[in-house]
Image (cartoon, rainbow, N blue to C red):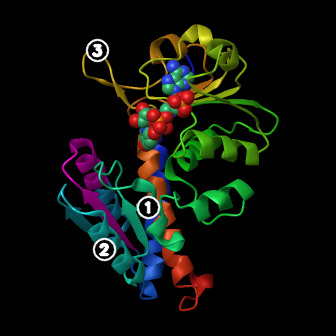
Amino acid sequence: MGQIIDGKMISKSVKDKVREQTEKLKEQGIVPGLAVIIVGENPASQIYVRNKQLACEEVGFESYKYALPESTTQAKLLELIKKLNADERVNGILCQLPLPEHIDESTVINNISPKKDVDAFHPVNVGKIMIGDYSFLPCTPAGVMELIASTGTEISGKECVVVGRSNIVGKPMAMLLLHKSGTVTVCHSKTVDLKAQCKRADILVAAVGVKKLIKGDMVKQGAVLIDVGMNRDENGKLCGDIDFESCKDKASYITPVPGGVGPMTIAMLMKNTLTAAIEQNKEKLNVNNL
Ligand code: NDP
């Protein structure tokens, strides 16, 4: 059986480092702050927001939660974002998606200051990632890169297959693997022979949202398998896009769901917020003491 990549443990070590640096920032009078906005009552979003607040507590950040009713107008939400863009205590702004239908997500994202866009969804940050000159990386793909690094796997020259092409996961994931000189293939719902594509992969990242789509006969012996998917199986149990049971013996390394990519996403959000706090206070800080 392949080795299981322990996302919980790796995310803890990322958060430990963030906490240590936060303590040093605090010695210089800076407390990193993350504003989290949630609109409406989506139960999954409520859990994500709660977990992000808990992570802030863990690393020593201030968190500012804005829970707005479902009926909130786009204008009201943009007003709040404008206020937070100008608030010095707030280094990162995160607007939990999805938003209610009457609010346009891209308008909201475009109104967050790129300097405080710790999700790295703003077009300015997306463009910087494309060029390879960035301050923040989107949290989930950045977390996946940490998980791959933890295995000691060299990406350069490897066949990397990303299944899924969303703006949040698939596309930036492909770009990060390309920056590390992987030979990258991106698959999606119109890919003709998904099995043939996946079978070539030395590193396979599945970000689809279809439970257990990738089966053992679709992967190469010795591949590194990273599962971003978060789905419910027939019994309501959390499961990924990769069929763990049929793939685990072929993989050299494999992430579980839960306990793989999920915890990394929040850890990387903490890392981005710390980076934002340092960048925004560059003039005031003695960076040699960080
Ligand atoms: P999206 O729905 O935005 O994108 C899914 C992608 O998968 C699309 O590009 C789609 O293709 C492709 N796809 C759908 N069906 C197939 C198929 N049968 N074969 C090949 N490709 C297919 O999802 P996200 O990227 O936002 O999320 C993907 C998964 O990752 C979800 O389960 C989500 O819950 C999870 N997730 C987990 C996170 C974590 O922290 N662990 C964070 C973010 C997401 P097309 O473009 O052609 O429609």
Residue type, mark 3 in image: Glu
User: For the residues marked 2 and 1, what is the alpha-carbon distance in whole angstroms?
Assistant: 14 Å
User: CB atoms at circles 3 and 1 under 8 Å apart?
Assistant: no
Q: Quadrant of the C terminus?
A: bottom right
Circle 2 SS class: helix
Residue type, mark 1 in image: Thr
User: For the residues marked 3 and 2, what is the alpha-carbon distance in whole angstroms?
Assistant: 41 Å
Q: State the image quarter where residue 34 is shown.
A: bottom left
Compared to residue 218, the image places residue 180 above or below, namely below
Residues packed near mark 3 inside 10 Å, few (<14), some (14 to 19) or many (20 plus): few
Residue type, mark 2 in image: Leu
Residue at point 45%, 69% (across, down) = 112
User: For the residues marked 3 and 1, what is the alpha-carbon distance in whole angstroms?
Assistant: 37 Å
- Range covered by the magenta-colored residues: 33-51
Residue at point 29%, 53% (across, down) = 102
Image disc number at residue 234: 3
Question: Can you identify the residue that label 2 sits on?
Answer: 80
Q: Position of residue 96 (x, y in %)?
A: 34, 54
Image disc number at residue 107: 1
Q: Position of residue 159 (x, y in %)?
A: 75, 28
Is residue 254 visible in the rendered structure shown here? no
Image disc number at residue 286: none
Q: Quadrant of the N terminus?
A: top right
Residues packed near mark 1 inside 10 Å, few (<14), some (14 to 19) or many (20 plus): few
Q: Image check: 150 left or right of 260? A: right
Circle 3 SS class: loop
Q: Given the current orientation, which residue lies at the most extreme bottom position?
A: 284
Circle 1 SS class: helix
